[in-house]
Amino acid sequence: MDPRQFHLALLHKYRLRPDRKLGQHFLVDPVALDRVVSAAGLSGVETVLEIGAGLGALTDRLAARAREVVAVEYDRRLLAPLQEAVGHRSNVRLVSADILEVDLRAYLGSKPYRVVANIPYQITSLLLRRFLERQPVPDRLVLTIQREVAERVVSGPGELSLLALGVQMYGEPSIQGRIPAGSFLPPPGVDSAILRVDVHAHPVVAQELVEPVFRLARAGFAQKRKKLRNALAAGLAVSTEEAETRLREAGIDPSARAETLGLPDWQRLAERWDFKSGGSKAG
């Protein structure tokens, strides 16, 4: 049966309607579903964590390609229809939980794993941070997210955002395809994209510089319309002159704005910024 018709039949049988407050837009287009699975690059030996299994269209396709699928669904109303949809798959484990609170080790142990999911738009940033900054970290993330957000994540200096900086600190993001709104039930108000993040074994900057880079970047992007010397002075409670000195030491134009810097720029600045003493490092 066509996934759209199958979803409609399940919703009708269980007298359910997608909950917009939970950001429920079920991916039902077969071509789009296959593109998501293809982006995951599964070979049959992987453990896949799916977030928001919904009514199981993606779950079923993942189970056909992976060794094991741990499908997490927050909405308890969907558990019965989900079980009906994928109960024939012996390699699917259904978990009723909030993915932002669940202890992943309880379900994944120490095995390497891969995240593949059609996620609610409103928790995109939270999920990216959850899976990139906290253990256990997956080796790859494949997510359907709002197209404009995906384009921001893969942007470089000139259009860099705090979200892009955070993702690029931990992995290499790429857009694997675009998904029109009509591929979902119900259709969202905007188109989506398939974002893939190949996660690095370690952050691209030294571990001791990760927090300083984020602290500086948060200050810079908090007032991104301001020149960096002013934004950093305000955000880090130093004088404009001090901020300008530190920027120049790092080879950065003090009149630049946060989005024009690349990750190497923030790293050089973090190497020069001494948060303990409040002064710039010698060197």
Image (cartoon, grey):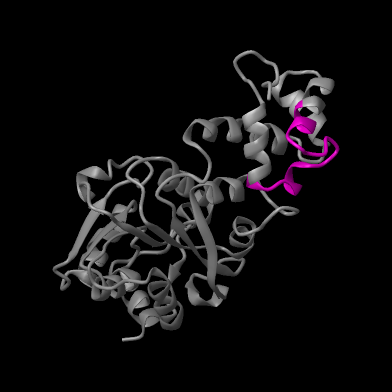
User: In the image shown, does 29 or 253 lie closer to the viewer?
Assistant: 253
Q: Residue at x 82, y 28 (%)?
A: 244
Task: Please identify the quarter of the rendering in which residue 48 is found.
Answer: bottom left
Q: Is residue 149 left or right of residue 210?
A: right
Q: Residue furthest front?
A: 283
Q: Residue at x 82, y 39 (%)?
A: 253
User: In the image shown, does 69 or 200 lie closer to the viewer?
Assistant: 200
Q: Position of residue 264 (x, y in %)?
A: 64, 45
Q: Is residue 126 left or right of residue 256?
A: left
Location of the C terminus (image quadrant): top right
User: In the image shown, does 283 or 27 lie closer to the viewer?
Assistant: 283
> Is 234 included in the stretch rendered in magenta?
no
Q: Position of residue 239 (x, y in %)?
A: 80, 18
Q: Is residue 92 left or right of residue 53?
A: left
User: In the image shown, does 44 or 186 lie closer to the viewer?
Assistant: 44
Segment colored magenta? 246-263
Above-or-below relation of 195 to 112: below
Location of the N terminus (image quadrant): bottom left
